[in-house]
Amino acid sequence: MSMDNPDTHPDFARGGGQAYRGYEKTGVLPEDPELTHTDPGTPMGDLMRRFWQPVCLSEELTDVPRAIRILGEDLVAFRDKSGRVGVLHRHCAHRGASLEYGIIQETGIRCCYHGFHWDVDGTLLDAPGEPDGGERMSRTVGQGAYPAFERYGMVFAYMGGYDQMPKFPEWEFFHTYDDLEFASYSNIYPCNWLQVFDNIPDQIHTSQLHSPHMRVIGDDDDGGYPTTAFNPVFAQLPVMEYASVRDDTAMIFSAGRRVGRERVWVRLNDVILPNLTLHPHTAEDGREARYFHRVYMARWYVPIDDENSIVFGLRMFGDSIDPYGTGDKSKCGYDKADFLDGQTGERPREVAQRLPGDWDAVTSQRRIARHAMENPTKEDVGVYMNRKNLRMAVRGENPSMAQTAVHARANAGRRNYVYTNNTVLDIPVREGDDDALVREVCKKVLEIVVAGDAYEGVERDAFIDGALRDYERSFAAAAAAE
Ligand code: FES
Ligand SMILES: [Fe+2]
């Protein structure tokens, strides 16, 4: 509102009940500590610590130790010269010097200050100042240590109580195709972990934030169309269905999109407690038939502390999972990934403001998003369903999230099955209420995939593939009968 005439007070009449109420809305309500706080001793922190978590990338382990901060704990990670990974409390148990300056040994690490030599399990191997080399001392003094190992370029650690340690879950998505190759990456977010996790069950954002119209077009725009959208079909507003699955230990959303007049593309993602999401191919656009096309990316949302978090991602490559060859391994690594602009904070603000991405939107929700100040729409159902599942788990109200139950398959050496997939079926437009048809297809695909839980291994794949094809054929048969 410009004021060309300084004698004129513009008309600030309140246009409605909520107009001009800034002064009354300055209060900032408290955060939601039950779900957002993860330091030692917090309920959410305890839940996270009962699962194997990625803590850094293999590429971060060099000839010197790596200082890391996870779940509010200052740690060091290193690979000793015999190849074993250590994740130790950062401050030496002798007199507190940082093991970031420790010298990596054939076995374990030696503190730079007075030479205490710690094994990767925290055992004191040598204390140079002690007459017996620290043998007696080692019975009562140890460095805080966590079990850790490397897989697919990621270091996983178990930061919970040792007696409760489960076996590392052998996820089926490690084994879906024979030609599968992996690369890991990370993205650092200067905000609480949960809002980064929330961004996935908040799937409706893909049709807004990642849409070609969500950008500032300058006067000098050359007509080129940079966007943070995966592709134009992806940017379509999907028909969304949400379901809490596997006894509320996970939720799933399916996004249904009409492709041309003959096809429906259904995209299913798993959102698994406490902090893992799975994604089918992000470059899918429904151009080819697809039956249960599997996980293309897995992401763990790991708190650094309450105001910082890190996403650890595992990307899958190979012709089977990436038929369009859009992936680029060389772009995956520390704080960088090979998909979409705007996944990291490296872009200049002028660029990010004109073409905002996930990183920009999510980190801008305050350092810790205030749930009590949200005004949800019906499209936020996924976010709230997931938080409800988390809250039940944190409160111990879901027996399926008890330590023995949630890790039962892993501990029994069985694979953990997941539902994530892209499926593209030949199903023609139903005039008049096509959205209702797309919704039916979403529900049916989820129903078929869940029914696959009755089978294992190749039998499961065969059942799901067969049932999807049968379902698709039922439309052709119905059309032929008309
Ligand atoms: S502080 Fe580490 S050896 Fe003394
Ligand atoms: Fe996004």
Image: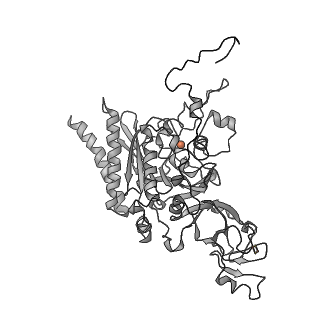
Residue 53, image quadrant = bottom right
Residue 115, image quadrant = bottom right
Viewer-side residue, 320 vs 12:
12
Q: In which quarter of the image is the C terminus?
A: top left
Residue 151 in view in this figure? yes
- Where does the image place residue 180, in percent across and percent down from the top left? 50, 58
**Total label count?**
0
Q: Is residue 58 shown left or right of residue 439?
A: right
Q: Is residue 109 shown left or right of residue 442?
A: right
Above or below 81: residue 474: above
Q: Residue at x 47, y 61 (%)?
A: 178
Extreme residue in the bottom direction: 132
- Where does the image place residue 333, in percent across and percent down from the top left? 63, 54
Viewer-side residue, 347 vs 407:
407
Residue 121, image quadrant = bottom right
Q: Residue at x 46, y 35 (%)?
A: 236
Q: Which residue is drawn at 64% across and 51% down?
A: 335
Viewer-side residue, 220 vs 242:
242
Q: Is residue 166 shown left or right of residue 448?
A: right
